[in-house]
Amino acid sequence: MGMMWTTENRPRYNRDKLRYPSDLTDEEWAHLEHLIPPAKRGGRRRKVDEREVLNGLLYVLSTGCQWALYPSGLAAAKHLVRLLPTLGV
């Protein structure tokens, strides 16, 4: 793996096409997806997209956003709070 900001690698790290710069790319999500605990057996099916929950968490961490100013376009803040203990935070 070469230096991060070479001419060849620069397009790989371009975040211009993402909704927010903190959103995960498909490649990043592929590395992290298996770290999200599966839904419990016998329970209800998940209604939220776990990737969107992680995108929301990354948004808050990267911007320092207050919960009251959290964008409505991301997963509901209550889902972020639910995910924190499973990530060891």
Image (tube, rainbow, N blue to C red):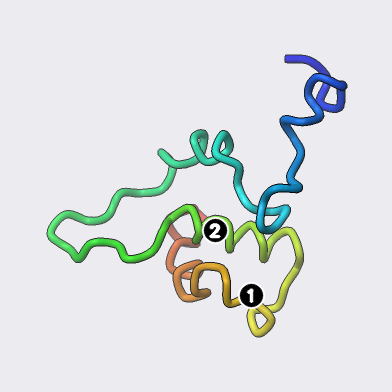
Q: CA distance from mark 1 to mark 2?
A: 22 Å
Circle 1 crowding by C-alpha within 10 Å: few under 14, some 14–19, many from 20: some
Determine whether the residue tagged by mark 2 lies in a helix, strand or loop.
loop
Looking at the image, residue 31 sits to the left or right of residue 8; the answer is left
Q: Position of residue 23 (x, y in %)?
A: 63, 52
Q: Which residue position holds label 2? A: 89
State if disc 2 and disc 1 touch (CB < 8 Å): no
Circle 2 crowding by C-alpha within 10 Å: few under 14, some 14–19, many from 20: few
Residue found at the far left of this picture: 42
Q: Is residue 65 above or below residue 1?
A: below
Residue found at the far top of this picture: 1
Looking at the image, residue 41 sits to the left or right of residue 24; the answer is left
Residue 71, disc: 1
Looking at the image, residue 73 sits to the left or right of residue 41; the answer is right
Q: Nearer the viewer, mark 1 or mark 2?
A: 1
Q: Is residue 54 above or below residue 32?
A: below
Residue at image position (58%, 77%) is 72
Quadrant in the rendering for residue 74:
bottom right
Residue kind at label 1, given as amino acid type? Pro
